[in-house]
Image (cartoon, coloured by chain):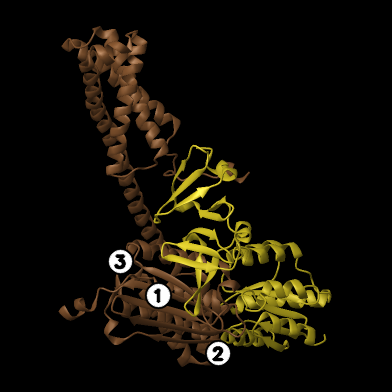
Chain colours: A brown, B yellow
């Protein structure tokens, strides 16, 4: 079925995959051997073989108990985790001691009745070494998690950089979008004959638009005033071309004129409205660009009375780009909201956090 | 020679006027019997006036120049007009279809006019533009604009309707009458049942993991499995977990 061909994202994993279980058990066995050597060297217990049998059975029992605990209690947190590990160690150490005695051929009575101190010693040592080893695994896990987090952070940063670069490139291309340019030039040429004054005005608009977008694409931040100028120039040109089919208004409160704003966020929305909303509609329609301010947010709305999203469902490509940039620029606090406009068309709102009115007064 | 009639179709008035003016210089006897500002008007004009020639802008509202051409080819000579469409221009060159580039230059127009005059004098039966070519150009014009999968869901928000791009949806959950749409910003309801969504969403991006749950793969952070073989999906940006029923576990199995 479909699943076979679908690549999985890299951070999706089974919590307990077999490979990791084997690796943990193997490492534990290695530690157990070292413990056995160490204890034999100190002259503790009863010779290397007996020590090895005991340390392996106790260590592996503890390890299996902890792994089993993880299996049943998925992702325990904080205190729960410590309690779980402690419980697993007591159970594991007890079970391991008996298992070790069984393998080494030492009767249980020796452990239980003969020398109860030995049993307590073994339990104590099991918990001691168990804690050390668990801590080792715990910090190893923590390190790999931190690494994964770091990597994710790095991927995020690189993606943002790539996106910015892409946007710059796209904008550089967009401002000389051939169809728009040649169509505007044809209009100017025809107007120079029929209505020279109008033709000259359109040439001025086109110059204004080209100059603004050429410089804008290279800058990281502009002002709302400059952005609205660009939008105005673009709409002025479209107005000459579309005539009665296009009505528009651009409203920006005077005090927001110098407010900083990322370049070329509004322009794609306006272009989208013209191209996909109005140009394809016989009777055309209206576009209104509006900037509003609330105590916490700055809201920029581009509404059109065109075909809406059902008429051209692919209008989303440019919008997706704007959404991704907003998210990246404002760390998830910038939003792009799409609404149906009544009776027809689309209303797109950019909402970004407002630096707050205090910032304004202090300036 | 009998009077030759032509129509001009372009949605931009200054451009119609410009072409008309240039034509009156290059071919004073040509009668422009009508101007259309969209594809439908162009079709009407052709039916009403039966012109010998139609100048058609490629990009027009209503019907595009290609769509008009598809319907009228064979009944008159067609000259396409475009500001810029490299792909179409190359195709026209290859298939010897008449076309003009905006802004229309007098030299180029003269060539086209001469060709048309020659053709009409030799053989009054209009040429046909190959339907394959029109079809190809048409599907290229509209093809990229009709994705096969659902792109937006419409949700009631206040007294308006919001369009949420499906890419932003973390998961869909079936309710009694409605389907719940969960995004980073909250939950909303839509009328479309899970069954329909499963059909319409892109299966590479959305997995049905339960009879009543469809999850956006890009929001899955982890999948774990219980002893009973049932899976549990953990999400990015949401605290809750989602159950995977056994019949959908194969989706995660290749790990």
Residue A51 in view, yes or no: yes
Q: Are marks 3 and 1 in contact (CB under 8 Å)?
A: no
Snapshot quadrant of residue A226: bottom left
Describe the element under mark 3 as helix, strand or loop.
loop
Binning the other alpha carbons within 10 Å of mark 1 as few (below 14), some (14 to 19) or many (20 upward) gives some
Q: Which residue is mark 3?
A: A220
Q: Residue at x 28, y 44 (%)?
A: A78
Going by the picture, which residue comes out furthest to the front?
A: A113
Q: Chain of mark 2?
A: A
Q: Residue at x 20, y 76 (%)?
A: A359
Q: Nearer the viewer, mark 3 or mark 1?
A: 3
Q: Position of residue B174 (x, y in %)?
A: 56, 60
Query: Going by the image, does A100 lie left or right of B54?
Result: left
Q: Nearer the viewer, mark 2 or mark 1?
A: 2
Above or below, comparing residue A195 to residue A331 in the picture: below
Above or below, comparing residue A125 to residue A134 in the picture: above
Q: Residue at x 31, y 21 (%)?
A: A58
Q: Which residue is mark 1?
A: A210
Describe the element under mark 1 as helix, strand or loop.
helix
Q: CA distance from mark 2 to mark 1?
A: 24 Å
Q: Chain of mark 1?
A: A
| Label 3 in the same subunit as label 1 | yes
| Label 2 in the same subunit as label 1 | yes
Snapshot quadrant of residue B135: bottom right
Binning the other alpha carbons within 10 Å of mark 3 as few (below 14), some (14 to 19) or many (20 upward) gives few
């Amino acid at each position: 079925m479909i699943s076979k061909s679908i690549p999985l994202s890299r951070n999706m994993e089974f919590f307990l995959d077999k490979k990791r279980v084997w690796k943990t058990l193997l490492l534990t066995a290695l530690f157990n051997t070292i413990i056995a050597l160490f204890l034999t060297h100190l002259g503790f217990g009863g010779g290397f073989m007996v020590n090895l049998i005991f340390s392996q059975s106790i260590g592996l029992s503890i390890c299996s108990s902890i792994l089993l605990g993880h299996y049943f209690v998925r992702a325990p947190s904080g205190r729960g985790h410590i309690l779980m590990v402690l419980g697993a160690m007591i159970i594991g150490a007890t079970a391991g001691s008996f298992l070790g005695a069984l393998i080494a051929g030492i009767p249980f009575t020796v452990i239980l009745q003969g020398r109860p101190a030995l049993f307590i010693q073994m339990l104590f040592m099991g918990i001691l070494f168990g804690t050390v080893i668990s801590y080792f695994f715990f910090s190893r896990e923590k390190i790999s998690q931190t690494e994964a987090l770091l990597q994710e952070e790095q991927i995020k940063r690189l993606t943002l950089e790539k996106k910015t670069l892409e946007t710059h490139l796209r904008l550089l291309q967009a401002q000389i979008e051939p169809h728009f340019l040649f169509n505007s030039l044809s209009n100017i040429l025809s107007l120079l004959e029929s209505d020279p004054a109008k033709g000259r005005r359109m040439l001025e608009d086109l110059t204004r638009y080209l100059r603004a977008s050429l410089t804008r694409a290279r800058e990281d931040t502009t002002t709302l005033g400059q952005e609205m100028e660009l939008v105005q120039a673009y709409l002025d040109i479209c107005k000459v071309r579309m005539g009665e089919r296009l009505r528009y208004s651009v409203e920006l409160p005077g005090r927001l004129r110098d407010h900083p704003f990322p370049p070329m966020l509004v322009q794609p929305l306006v272009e989208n409205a013209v191209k996909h909303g109005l140009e394809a509609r016989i009777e055309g329609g209206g576009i209104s660009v509006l900037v509003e301010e609330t105590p916490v947010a700055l809201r920029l709305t581009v509404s059109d009375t065109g075909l809406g999203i059902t008429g051209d469902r692919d209008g989303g490509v440019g919008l997706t780009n704007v959404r991704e940039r907003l998210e990246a620029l404002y760390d998830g606090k910038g939003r792009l909201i799409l609404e149906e406009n009544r009776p027809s068309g689309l209303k797109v709102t950019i909402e970004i956090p407002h630096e707050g009115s205090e910032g304004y007064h202090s300036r | 020679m009998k009077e030759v009639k032509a129509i001009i179709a372009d949605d931009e008035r200054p451009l119609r006027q410009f072409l008309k003016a240039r034509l009156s210089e290059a071919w004073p006897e040509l009668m422009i019997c009508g101007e259309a500002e969209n594809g439908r008007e162009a079709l009407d004009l052709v039916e009403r006036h039966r012109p010998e020639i139609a100048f058609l802008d490629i990009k027009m509202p209503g019907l595009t120049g290609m769509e008009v051409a598809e319907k009228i080819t064979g009944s008159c000579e067609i000259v396409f007009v475009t500001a810029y469409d490299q792909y179409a221009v190359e195709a026209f060159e290859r298939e010897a279809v008449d076309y003009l580039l905006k802004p229309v230059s007098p030299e180029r127009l003269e060539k086209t006019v001469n060709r048309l005059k020659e053709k009409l004098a030799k053989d009054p039966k209009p040429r046909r533009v190959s339907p394959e070519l029109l079809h190809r150009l048409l599907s290229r014009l509209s093809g990229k604009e009709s994705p096969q999968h659902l792109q937006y869901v419409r949700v009631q928000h206040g007294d308006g309707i919001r369009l949420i791009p499906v890419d932003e949806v973390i998961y869909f959950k079936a309710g009694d009458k409605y389907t719940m749409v969960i995004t980073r910003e909250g939950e909303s309801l839509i009328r479309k049942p899970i069954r329909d969504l499963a059909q319409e969403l892109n299966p590479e991006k959305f997995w049905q993991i339960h009879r009543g749950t469809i999850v956006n793969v890009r929001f899955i952070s982890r999948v774990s499995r219980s002893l009973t073989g049932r899976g549990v999906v953990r999400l990015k940006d949401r605290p809750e977990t989602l159950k995977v029923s056994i019949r959908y576990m194969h989706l995660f199995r290749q790990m």
